[in-house]
Amino acid sequence: AVGFLAMVPFFHVEGFFGIDPVDNAGAAAMGLGSLGVPSVFVGETTDSAGSMACAPADQNYDVLWKAAPSPSLELTAVGADHTQFEDPASCSFCTLCTAGSADAAAVLRYSVRSLTAFFARELLGDTRVDAVLGADADIAAGKLVAQSK
């Protein structure tokens, strides 16, 4: 998608927010160094191992965050699984991934809040949005782990 957007002259990318992204072919990680916009990668580690890993450790959000240039934020959803970032009412393949121990409603809530805060800051210039996108309480409660560069 990044290459496509770069080719379309009327698009101007202001930021990237990845919701538990998986880089199956490895091409995204190779191209992230030239992204040139602020980015956030939110993900989980419950589905990172095993033969049916939905977000394999060598292709997950952490790999992509490490490849992204600064400024970039990584949010790890403690105890969440790959499908808890989706609306459970419309999740067709939720039973295929390792079940997480995190509260699904909380995972969805802080993911949407972080995404909204990120684009409010990047698109609208809202300076009230802090460095961890309003996730301070979730970090303090041990629901999220944040690191930035």
Image (cartoon, grey):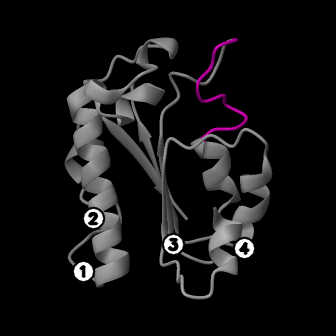
On-image quarter of the C terminus = bottom right
Residue that carries the numbered disc 3 in the rendered image: 38
- Give the distance between the C-alpha atoms of the residues marked 3 and 1, in whole angstroms: 14 Å
Q: Image check: 144 left or right of 147?
A: left
Label 2 vs label 1: CA separation? 8 Å
Q: What is the secondary structure assignment of the residue under circle 1?
A: loop
Sequence-first tag of 2 and 3:
3
The structure residue drawn at horizontal position 67% and vertical position 45%, both measured from the top left corner, is 63
Whether residue 78 is situated above or below residue 62 in the rendered picture: above
Q: What element carries label 2?
A: helix
Q: Which amino acid does label 2 sit on?
A: Ala
Q: Name the residue under label 4.
A: 34
Q: In this view, does 38 lie to the left or right of 107?
A: right
Q: Which amino acid does label 4 sit on?
A: Ser
**Residue 54, magenta (yes or no):** yes
- The answer to the question of whether label 2 and label 1 lie on touching residues, with beta carbons closer than 8 A, is yes
The tag earlier along the polypeptide, 1 or 4, is 4
Which secondary structure class fits the magenta region best? loop
Magenta highlight range: 51-60
Q: Residue 126 carries which label?
A: 1
Which element carries disc 3, helix, strand or loop? loop
Q: Residue at x 36, y 29 (%)?
A: 84
Q: In the figure, 24 relative to 46: above or below? A: below
Is residue 149 or residue 126 the one in the foreground?
126
In the figure, is residue 26 to the left or right of 20?
A: right
The residue that appears at 26% across and 26% down in the rendered structure is 89
Q: Which disc, if any, is residue 117?
A: 2
Disc 4 crowd rating (10 Å Cα; few below 14, some 14-19, many 20+) is: few
Q: How far apart are labels 1 and 4 at the CA level?
A: 25 Å
